[in-house]
Image (cartoon, rainbow, N blue to C red):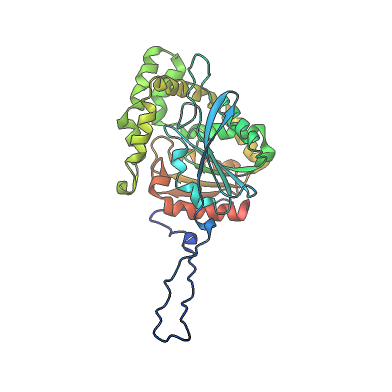
Amino acid sequence: MSTENITGPSAGLDRRHLVLGLSGVAVAAAAPAAAAKPQRDHARAADYPVTYHRTKTVDGIKIFYREAGPKDAPVVLLLHGFPTSSHMFRNLIPALADRYHVIAPDYPGYGQSDMPPRATFKYTFDRFGELVDGLLDQLGVKRYAMYVMDYGAPVGWRLALKHPERMSGLIVQNGNAYDEGLKEFWNPIKKYWADGSDSSRQALMKLLTLETTKFQYTDGMSDVSRISPDNWVHDQALLDRPGNNEIQLDMFYDYRTNLPLYPVVQAYFRKHKPPTLIVWGKNDFIFPADGAHPYKRDLPQVEFHLINSGHFLLEDRFDEVTPLIRDFLARKIA
């Protein structure tokens, strides 16, 4: 039976980073008036993990990735959504890296990875999955838990179907695997899928504007003052690169290939029963909670949490979600 929580205000902070060691106060025995030596903090280096920013060339494409944590620890793969990059995990990475080897790549055309011309590179979820798989091969990663969000879900599903034996667990945050999850937001995109016309394609350009990018970060959030404006400024600067809008329109069109994959993914859930945590922003207009509940059909043991937040809940409810993630990983894959 699934475990379900619908959460609101913060469930409390994870205090693990505040390990503090105090040096002793030495007083010279022969000098009664001697002052105490200054106290010094001796927090362990593991409590302040360093995130490294690296690049590997996979099939001729430079793939940027963030990496942190012990190389011999269980691996957690973080797969980002649209319109962002591994930047969305900048806070989560060090929050996990004391106990896990964390890897967060950027897809081509996103973040700091290469943005090859459309004439020489096919922007599809199939291709993204192949490149992430190639990156993991280069890094020698043979088993991992996946955090999938938005576009990260269809990329991750392709990895899971190709290498089911490598999956140690799943964390799903507003990442779809069911038809029920594609509601009103998707109507103009579905129109483009149906007719493939230039007019339908150009109508989607409004989804690439600063107004829409900001909307994705602020809509449905319980406290907008928690959301850094750096998020939409950063993402929009990358969206506004010459030629990137056409790449994004290609990805909108290719998203249609995910729908026939849903029954296969659901069969994977039923057969392999990966330990799964759902942490879902229940106010998300893009991937509403309608798409979260069906996971319980195929994964009866899923740990299920609807959070009072929107699309990018790590920006709004990081202090609430991170303890849930750490607890899940500690029980299921550590």
Give the quadrant of residue 327.
bottom right
Residue 54: percent from left, percent from top: 53, 37
Above-or-below relation of 199 to 50: above
**Percent x, y of residue 328:** 56, 53
Q: Residue at x 46, y 81 (%)?
A: 27
- For this orientation, the residue located farthest to the right is 165
Left or right: residue 103 compared with residue 88: right
Q: Residue at 61% across / 33% down in the picture?
A: 159
Any part of residue 127 in sight: yes
Q: Nearer the viewer, residue 91 or 202?
A: 91
Q: Is residue 333 above or below residue 246?
A: below
Name the foreground residue: 215 vs 302: 215
Residue visible at 38% across and 24% down?
A: 241
In this rendered view, identify the residue nearer to me: 266 or 249.
249
Q: Nearer the viewer, residue 309 or 97?
A: 97
**Whole-percent x, y for residue 82 in the image:** 44, 32
Q: Can residue 177 be seen in this snapshot?
A: no
The x, y position of residue 237, in whole percent, is 35, 30
In the displayed structure, would residue 236 be above or below residue 44? Answer: above
